[in-house]
Every structure is written in C-alpha cells, then in structure tokens.
Amino acid sequence: MFKTVPKEIKDEIISKAKAGEKVIDLAKLYGLNDKTIYRWLSNQAKPEISILGHNRLKRENEELKRISGLVTFELERKKKVEIINKSNNIKFSLSDKGSPWQNGYKESFFSRFKDENGDLNRFETLGELVEEIYSYISYYNRYRIHTSLKISPIQIKLKLGESVLNISGT
C-alpha cells in the first residue's frame, strides 16, 4: 500500500515546498498524501546539536527558571503588601508619571538627598545605608535651613512656641 518515492523525487518535492509551493498542490501533483510531505519536511527541520550547544541551552534554561522564580516571588510579595495595605486602610498618593510638579516637596527632598549623599552603592551593608538615610531625614526635618524662610525647622518651632506663649498671656 505504501509507495516508495525515489530520493531524487523526494528531494525535489522538499525543495519545492521550501521554496513556497503549497504542500497540498505538491501532494496532488505527485500522487502522495500531504502528511507524508509534512513528515519529510519535519525530518529535514531537526537540527543537529553539539554537546557544547546542549550544555549552553541547559545553562540558559536554568537561568530562565531562576529569573522566573524571582519574578514570581516579587509578584507574590507585591500581592501580600497590597493585602496588608488594604486591611490597614493605607492608601498611596502617587503623582502621574512624568508629572513631577504634582509632588514638588518630594521631588525637592529626593533631589537634595541624591546630591548630598552621592552614590548609594558605596555602602557595604544595608545597615550602613539605612543609618545614613535615617540620619539624613533627621537632619532634613530638624536642622537644614529652609530655602524660603531662611531658618531651620527647629528655629521655626521655637519661634512659634514663643509667639503662642505670648498670645495666650502666660
């Protein structure tokens, strides 16, 4: 029942199919089943792979699995944070992307923070970085000279405290 096709004819059919002729038309022309021609084409398409190539693909696959795991972990962590925020009625106030003027005070703070602290990668441990951030925030909120008032926040507090005392008559 199977028809033996000479190698020359088989190669001719394969080359015509690769050149763009429709497999169904080739099957009718040569009196073959189109599945036979598709099988020949798929056998032609199987590339030979070296051991080095196999090992390289194996390493790339492991790296992709690792990256996929990290992304999955981050997404799960993000979902947990969102659940905690919703359960504690925490709402984030974010400005629109590309609209820094909506949060001018934050932009000002982070601009100064970056300028005054330089490269944050210089810290050897996370603890050193956290300590620097806390000390800078303390400085920023208490001792830095406010640009428009030309006075530090602590001095403002002291002046306001005195004026409140004077108004109350004590």
Image: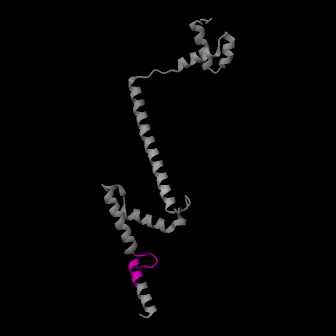
170 magenta-colored: no
Residue 9 falls left or right of residue 58 = right
Q: Considering depth in this image, is 123 or 88 the residue closer to the camera? A: 88
Reply above or below: 84 against 19. below
Residue occupying image coordinates x 53% and y 18%: 44
Can residue 37 be seen here? The reply is: yes
Percent of width and height locating residue 101: 54, 66
Can residue 152 be seen here? The reply is: no
Percent of width and height locating residue 14: 59, 15
Q: Considering depth in this image, is 42 or 73 the residue closer to the camera? A: 73
Q: Considering depth in this image, is 69 or 157 the residue closer to the camera? A: 69
Residue occupying image coordinates x 53% and y 21%: 45
153 magenta-colored: yes
Residue occupying image coordinates x 69% and y 12%: 29
Residue 145 falls left or right of residue 95 = left
For the N terminus, the image quarter is top right
- Extreme residue toward the front, this view: 87
Percent of width and height locating residue 21: 66, 19
Reply above or below: 35 against 136. above
Residue occupying image coordinates x 62% and y 18%: 17
Kindly indicate the quadrant of the structure image that contains residue 160. Answer: bottom left
Kindly indicate the quadrant of the structure image that contains residue 98. Answer: bottom right
Kindly indicate the quadrant of the structure image that contains residue 56. Answer: top left
Reply above or below: 45 against 80. above
Region rendered in magenta: 145-158
Percent of width and height locating residue 156: 42, 81
